[in-house]
Image (spheres, rainbow, N blue to C red):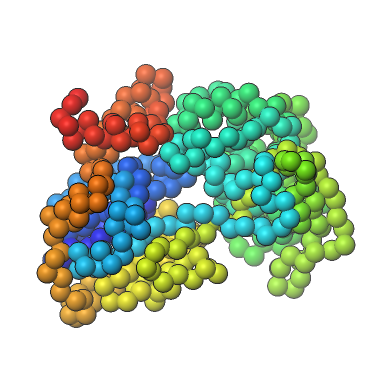
Amino acid sequence: MRVAVVGSGPAGFYAAGGLLSADPSAEVDMIERLPTPWGLVRLGVAPDHPKLKTVSRAFERIAEQPGFRFLGNVEVGRDLHHADLVRLYDAVLYAVGAQTDRRLGIPGEDLPGSWAATELVAWYNGHPDYQQVDFDLSVERAVVVGNGNVALDVARMLALTHEELAPTDATDASIEAIESAPIREIVVVGRRGPAQAAFTTPELQEMGELAGADVVVDPADLEGAEPQNTNAERNLAVLRDFAGREPEGKPRRVVFRFFHSPVAILGEERVEGVELVRNELDANERAVPTDEHETLSCGLVFRSVGYHGVELPGVAFDAATGTIPNEAGRIEPGVYCAGWIKRGPTGVIGTNKKDATETVELLLDDAAAGRLEPKPDASAAAVDALLAERGARFVEYAGWTAIDEVERAAGEKSGRPRVKLCSWDDLLAAAERIASGAS
């Protein structure tokens, strides 16, 4: 059985691993729009969290198994279409994640200086689509809207010193921009209270360990907070510690503002401020706006209120949830999904393992029960011929390992895990040296 797994993040690799280790095992072609695998492990995990990226070693072991092929720089909807995949594979499994951000839906959201947090994350992580984006960090105050770990990542990255940034795999351009920015204050705004924040405790604790930034929490925001779970209880203990600290006069400060929502981003030609409304919680812990408004001057707003899936041409899509309609990962016999495009952008990296396993078990059940339509054209040669006919410059796994070696070698010279190649031309050139036999 030949299966196309579209997407090479954690969900895609865990699905591939399940298929390759099945009895009988399947052959897997992993199709990825970028020349590089690993999804948000490479391009979403914060550069100062290298331990989280070590999960990639498990993915490398999966890629070494017989029957696995990586087809990078191949975009579904451009180089291959859904109809092609259904014809050329016995089954198709979409694991494309959630590639854009949720909108706030407020006036001024598209002013210059108002950004999706996902864009900044992609920029400092070296995503080739975001290296020409001009993030003007020459402001004194930035506002981050959201109370999840991505909001913390953005706030923390903007607060890091040279000594904290230098050993990371953030791009050189982003390190230089963050170091030289005149930012004095980063305000993290949450619509609900500290007991409802989605931070995980280790990430929250890190905010109190920043070398160059004080952390500020208003003790009044913590009064009456009632944790409903262990994570909230631990978060409240950390926030109470922050609230009791005296500022040390560090060059930057991170301020947590709970019970507030932005209702407008203000400015003529670019962001000049944000209008906030004070919220109260109802009996169901929903944020209900009051009549209390204030304007907070700022030059940057980063919206971090969640990721959102993107529609694939020819595949059913629920625009409200940003997911592909499915039942436990089955879209229809022969077509499946896993990860964020299946369940929405929730959970941590490891959550995708259970999720992908559920989908793969359904796929294998359908195969065993004869519910998959036989595909006489299902062969690697047929896929390669179609890609060649369409002029696709696909990157095989050996091409990715060539990129990896170049990046790691550059990093070794400066005591960093890697120095990323972050333009399409550089990535493809490094990958194609292997194909041409050059060293």
Q: Is residue 66 above or below residue 227?
A: above
Looking at the rendered structure, the number of numbered marks drawn on it comes to 0
Residue 395 screen position, x and y as percent: 25, 43
Residue at 73% across, 55% down: 107
Looking at this view, is 270 or 68 the one in front?
270
From where the camera sits, is residue 439 visible? yes
Residue ranking furthest to the top: 413
Residue at 39% across, 57% down: 96
Residue 380 screen position, x and y as percent: 15, 56
Residue at 84% across, 63% down: 290
Residue 242 screen position, x and y as percent: 71, 42
Q: Is residue 313 above or below residue 437?
A: below
Residue 121 screen position, x and y as percent: 53, 42
Check the picture and name the quadrant holding the C terminus.
top left
Q: Is residue 113 left or right of residue 48?
A: right
Looking at this view, is 255 or 132 the one in front?
132
